Amino acid sequence: MPKEPIILGIESSCDDTSAAIIYGRRILSNEIATQEIHSLYGGVVPELASRAHQQNIIPVVDTAIREANISKEDIDAVAFTQGPGLLGSLLVGSSFAKAYAMGMGIPLITVNHMQAHILSHFIDEGKAVPKFPFLCLTVSGGHTQIVRVESHSNMQVIGTTIDDAAGEAFDKSAKILQLAYPGGPLIDKYARGGNIHAFKFGKPKIKDLDFSFSGLKTSILYKIQDSVQKNPKFIQEHLGDLCASIQYSIVNILLEKIQKAIYKTGIKEIAIAGGVSANSFLRSELQKLADEKKINLYIPKFEYCTDNAAMIAISGYFKYLEKEFASQNEVPSASLSF
Ligand code: KG4
Ligand code: ZN
């Protein structure tokens, strides 16, 4: 049997600096340095993000190699996030990966961050992986997409947001509630025990499989501004109910469109990916839908939902098998599509 490759994955598209080592489809290490500094500013500050990547990249890669119990000479290829993402952040990871590949005389592999979120399902966890073709609801801080996945390399976006992403809707709502950044996990936490029907917010009317979240955000903002004017302690007194109702509204928009996509395509293999797929309400509501409609649902492990280099490494693995290597002339692209 041929030896499986060992690949170093590098992720630096937003505010997490991450390095992972994969052997075949098995993750040996997945190191992530999360940049806490952005919580002081209520969102990611691109200039600070690239500076922090610059500080973190070497220690993170060093630790990933050490944790994997390999030496740097064992690595067969370097895969890095080419985009989409913040250009200054992407430049750090791509420059590092190019220099590393050249220095070690090994192939370089470019990876699309959004495709990588989807391919994280193929990391060997000893459990079933989605069967082609499947639909993936990819929901992150920057994107909201329904993707029809035909193979590891052939994917089509069949629905996307026309304004904010689902993660952005969580984060912007959290900001209105005076919660720290990123607010998605906090809304998830405070929503537990809250009443999902306590408050009603505007529902978008967008055709086909596309999404919109900006109207919902405006409706939340007006409701809270009005209520705080009448009662300055409104947010504190109703935090659980507000979080539960906001979460319910966002998740409902996602559920409605995924149901429509299932109906339109007839595909009953469904996966979720991206940071928002860590949301407990989305997970449980999708599971209910899957049980009801006899759908095979694939939910990633928490650590592979938000940004991580393990998903870059597994994407690199599939390209390595196809010998799809990149040249040193490759540059990052903030709006890379597929
Ligand atoms: O995929 P990701 O780590 O980064 C991007 O590529 O954007 O996604 C980050 C997004 C943020 O908006 C964050 O608030 C959201 O994922 N998120 C959540 C949860 N965990 C992370 N949103 C709702 N509930 C969660 N538990
Ligand atoms: Zn992401």
Image (cartoon, rainbow, N blue to C red):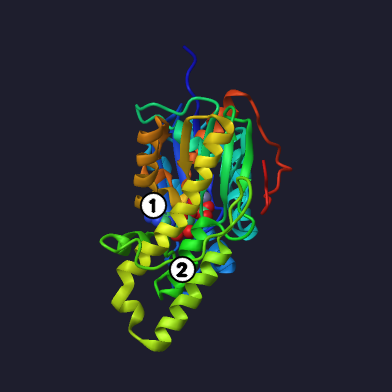
Element under label 2?
Answer: helix
Marks 1 and 2, Cα distance to the nearest angstrom? 15 Å
Disc 1 residue type? Asn
In the displayed image of the protein, which residue is found farthest to the right?
329
In the figure, residue 154 lies in which quadrant?
A: top right
- Asked if the residue under mark 2 is in contact with the one under mark 1, i.e. CB atoms within 8 Å, the reply is no
Q: In this view, does 170 lie to the left or right of 327?
A: left
In percent of width and height, residue 186 lies at 36, 63
In percent of width and height, residue 250 lies at 46, 57
Classify mark 1 as within 8 Å of ligand 1 or not, answering yes or no.
yes
Label 1: few (<14), some (14–19) or many (≥20) C-alpha neighbours in 10 Å: some
Q: Which residue is drawn at 34% across and 45% down?
A: 284
For ligand 1, the image quadrant comes to bottom left
In percent of width and height, residue 135 lies at 53, 35
Residue hosting label 1: 279
Position above or below: 290 against 62:
above
* Image mark for residue 173: 2
Residue 261 visible in image = yes
Of residues 84 and 234, which is closer to you in this image? 234
Disc 2 residue type? Ser
Label 2: few (<14), some (14–19) or many (≥20) C-alpha neighbours in 10 Å: many
Q: In this view, does 89 lie to the left or right of 56?
A: right
